[in-house]
Image (spheres, helix red, strand yellow):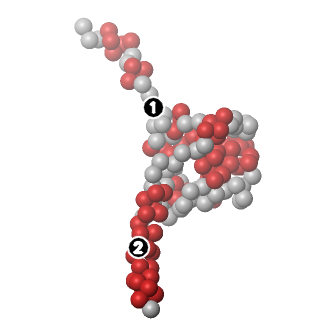
Amino acid sequence: MAKRSHLRNSIPLLILLFIIIVPCAQAGEWEAPVWADTLINPVVFDSIAQVEARALYMKNCSACHGETGHGDGMMARGMQPPPVAFADDPDLPSDPVGELYWKISTGRKPMPSWKKDLTEEQIWMLVSYVKGLAPVIVPPDSLRTPDADSTRK
């Protein structure tokens, strides 16, 4: 009987450890497999695809990632890890499209896997749409005008 009470006393500790460890492990870096970097987006992102992609994003993604991609959707509060803020990620434009495709397809708690609910074409449309939410970084040198340089004398 002593063993049973020892085990019974250990169960709350094990549950507590599980509650702490699992979210911490998920909060780490989310790495796509290396092969994902070789994927190429086959979808032509024309005006029709843009409209469909926006509708897909608003229906499936905006509740967490926000309507404009700032990670501020109505479901985002308290999420661990928090939803990606596409519109605030200066690295997003250079991220491989296959990596984003894999992440949308595969998911990671709390984000669901979308590969059973969306077609490959729809996921690729979302990849293009999300990439378009990224901030446009303008190099400081491109902001200089010839007139501004000539007036510094």
Residue 116, quarter of the rendered image: bottom right
The local secondary structure at tag 2 comes to helix
Residue corresponding to mark 2: 16
Q: Are marks 2 and 1 in contact (CB under 8 Å)?
A: no
Q: Nearer the viewer, residue 141 or 145?
A: 141
Compared to 43, does 3 lie above or below?
Answer: below
**Percent of width and height locating residue 134:** 51, 40
**Residue 88 location, x and y as percent?**
45, 44
Toward the viewer: 112 or 72?
Answer: 112
Q: Is residue 121 visible?
A: yes
**Kind of residue indicated by mark 1:** Ile
Q: Secondary structure at mark 1?
A: loop
Residue at the disc numbered 1: 137
**Residue visible at 40% across and 76% down in the picture:** 13
In the image: residue 22, left or right of residue 41: left
| Left or right of 65, for residue 101 | right
Q: Residue at 41% of width from left, 73% of height from top?
A: 16
